[in-house]
Image (cartoon, rainbow, N blue to C red):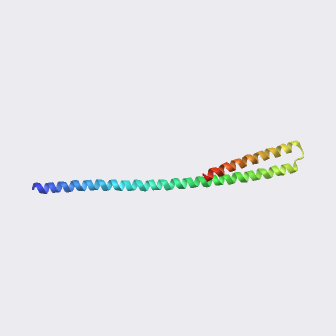
């Protein structure tokens, strides 16, 4: 074989190998970018679910607060003794605490 043909063949093989390596790297970069996008989308979905959960928790606390306030009002109306008044005050404190928790959960949900 002549030297020029061998040189051309060797240059072609080297060029093909380099192009294949570059193409492989580009494919891997693209695949990595696609995975990063999928991970970001999943993180966004997770954050939205956390916000939804916090909003639901806030609503649940508000419902509990409303029920405690209703109980407090009923206890106050029906209080005929010191013990009943103490129970009404405890229910009112529970309602106040639940309202504070609901407000905190709502604030966390907005963030």
Q: Quadrant of the N terminus?
A: bottom left
Q: Residue at x 59, y 52 (%)?
A: 50
Q: Is residue 110 above or below residue 90?
A: below
Left or right: where 31 falls relative to 11: right
Left or right: where 56 falls relative to 70: left
Q: Position of residue 100 (x, y in %)?
A: 71, 47
Q: Residue at x 37, y 54 (%)?
A: 29
Left or right: where 36 falls relative to 60: left
Q: Residue at x 69, y 53 (%)?
A: 60
Left or right: where 107 falls relative to 22: right
Q: Position of residue 3 (x, y in %)?
A: 10, 54
Label count reads 0
Q: Position of residue 82 (x, y in %)?
A: 88, 42
Q: Residue at x 84, y 49 (%)?
A: 75
Please, which residue is most extreme toward the left here? 2
């Amino acid at each position: 074989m002549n030297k020029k043909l061998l040189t051309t063949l060797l240059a072609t093989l080297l060029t093909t190998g380099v192009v294949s390596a570059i193409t492989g790297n580009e494919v891997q970069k693209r695949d990595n970018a696609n995975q990063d996008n999928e991970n970001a989308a999943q993180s966004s979905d997770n954050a939205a679910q956390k916000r939804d959960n916090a909003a639901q928790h806030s609503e649940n606390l508000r419902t509990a607060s409303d029920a405690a306030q209703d109980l407090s009002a009923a206890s106050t109306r029906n209080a005929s003794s010191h013990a009943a008044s103490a129970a009404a005050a405890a229910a009112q404190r529970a309602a106040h605490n639940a309202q504070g928790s609901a407000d905190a959960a709502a604030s966390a949900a907005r963030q």
